[in-house]
């Protein structure tokens, strides 16, 4: 099936299962010896029937702890891994067919892997990609200029890649991945290892690329700033199962058990008294930060205003990264939707 502009789903994943068959190594020399003759097979269930769909132009955060199945999913969707069972469709194609038209429309960028040739300047890899993807000269030039501009890499195009910093290299990796203007972008940990300035630049670029080119983006990251700043919708996966699929704000309001009350006191006050209202997280006169259960936050605030010398007061949500950390650590139980 060919991609048509009117397609209402850019990605369809339906009951996708991916198992890896691995041989278990036994320990010690005797173990190695016996493994050789009677290798013990084990099945790793990386994806246990996951289903979701993504509309064209959406930017979705795909998050979960180590080993959850994120990279496996992205590899299946880009046609690098064959699914054990289930249905997957990307831009109207079965990814596994690796149809040339499909390959021209997608790109997978992995923060930990690189496609640039280490000993060559990046510009030479770009030229190679132009040939591989059969990008017409005019479009290549336009696309290259635009990307070089957006990612600010003009000065390093002719430097041997091995001499560049990680941040510089990652920006060039993105140029390489986007030269053919893919409609679908799979980003696996695009900010890993980057310093905060480079992370912010990378995020701005991703945001822009999504907006400007209307590209569909599926992004994994352990960096909550990436998720919070880029994705409105998140899919949470753990142990090969999808635990949540929806608005990031909904995730927060559903799983945030507490609220944070910040008060400014007009005079010093006994901490013990404040502790009667909620858990005192920080006190640094004139400011005090209290953690209170969500359900009683309003009552706690009223009590503070009534009985304490309060100059100012705000009630805030728990930080998103804190909630996600709790979800992953099991402090907060996520139940499957529906
Ligand atoms: N080629 C492989 N052979 C065997 N097992 C694999 C293979 N690739 C992944 N796995 C296993 O599948 C599971 C999911 O791995 P995956 O790389 O998808 O996790 P992830 O969510 O990307 O984790 P991380 O956050 O650490 O990148 C893990 O248990 C992993 O060990
Ligand atoms: Mg991974």
Image: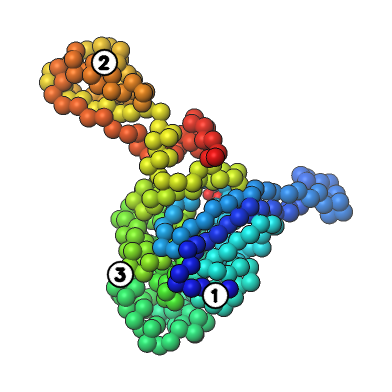
Relative horizontal placement of residue 158, taking residue 37 as reference (left or right): left
Q: Label 3's element?
A: helix
Mark 1 and mark 3: Cα distance apart in space: 31 Å
Depth-wise, is mark 1 or mark 3 nearer the camera? 1
Image quarter hosting the N terminus: bottom right
**On the picture, is 60 further left or further right than 68?**
left
User: Which quadrant is the C terminus positioned in?
Assistant: top right
Tag 2 near tag 1, CB within 8 Å: no
Residue annotated with mark 2: 274
Front of the two marks 2 and 1: 1
Label 1 sits on a secondary structure element that is: loop
Of 267 and 301, which appears nearest the observer? 301
Give the x, y percent position of residue 55. Answer: 46, 60
Residue drawn where x is 37% and y is 63% of the image: 210
Question: Which residue is nearer to you in this view: 132 or 106?
Answer: 106
Which residue is identified by label 3?
Answer: 150
The label on residue 225 is: none
Q: Pick whichever, 321 or 193, lies toward us.
A: 321
In this picture, is 105 found above or below 33? below
Q: Residue at x 45, y 72 (%)?
A: 5
Q: CA distance from mark 3 to mark 2?
A: 51 Å
Q: Secondary structure at mark 2?
A: helix
The correct choice, above or below, for 183 with respect to 13 in the image is below
Residue beneath the point at 24% across and 28% down? 262
Identify the mark nearer the N-term, 3 or 2: 3
Residue at the disc numbered 1: 2
């Amino acid at each position: 099936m060919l991609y048509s502009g009117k397609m209402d789903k850019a990605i369809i994943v339906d009951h996708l299962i991916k198992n890896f068959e691995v041989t278990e190594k036994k320990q010690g020399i005797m173990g190695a010896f016996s493994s050789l003759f009677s290798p013990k097979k084990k099945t790793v269930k990386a994806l246990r029937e996951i289903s979701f769909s993504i509309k064209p132009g959406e930017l979705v955060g795909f998050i979960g702890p180590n080993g959850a199945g994120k990279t496996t999913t992205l590899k299946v969707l880009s046609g690098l891994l064959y699914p054990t069972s289930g249905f997957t469709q990307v831009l109207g194609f079965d990814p596994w067919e690796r149809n040339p038209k499909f390959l021209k429309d997608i790109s997978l960028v992995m923060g930990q892997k690189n496609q640039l040739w280490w000993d060559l300047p990046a510009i030479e890899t770009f030229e190679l990609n132009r040939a591989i993807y059969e990008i017409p000269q005019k479009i290549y030039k336009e696309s290259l200029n635009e990307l070089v501009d957006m990612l600010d890499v003009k000065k390093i195009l002719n430097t041997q890649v091995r001499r560049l910093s990680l941040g510089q290299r990652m920006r060039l990796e993105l140029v390489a991945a986007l030269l053919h203007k893919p409609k679908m972008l799979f980003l696996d940990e695009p900010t890993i290892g980057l310093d905060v300035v480079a992370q912010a630049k990378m995020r701005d670029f991703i945001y822009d690329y999504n907006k400007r080119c209307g590209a569909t983006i599926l992004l994994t990251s352990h960096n909550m700033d990436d998720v919070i700043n880029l994705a409105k919708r998140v899919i949470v996966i753990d142990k090969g199962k999808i635990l949540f699929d929806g608005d990031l704000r909904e995730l927060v309001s559903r799983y945030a058990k507490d609220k944070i009350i910040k008060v400014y006191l007009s005079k010093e006050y006994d901490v013990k008294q404040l502790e009667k209202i909620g858990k005192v997280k920080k006190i640094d006169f004139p400011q005090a930060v209290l953690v209170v259960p969500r359900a009683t936050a309003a009552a706690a605030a009223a009590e503070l205003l009534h009985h304490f010398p309060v100059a100012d007061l705000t009630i805030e949500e728990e930080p998103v990264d804190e909630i996600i950390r709790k979800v992953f650590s099991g402090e907060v139980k996520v139940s499957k939707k529906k």
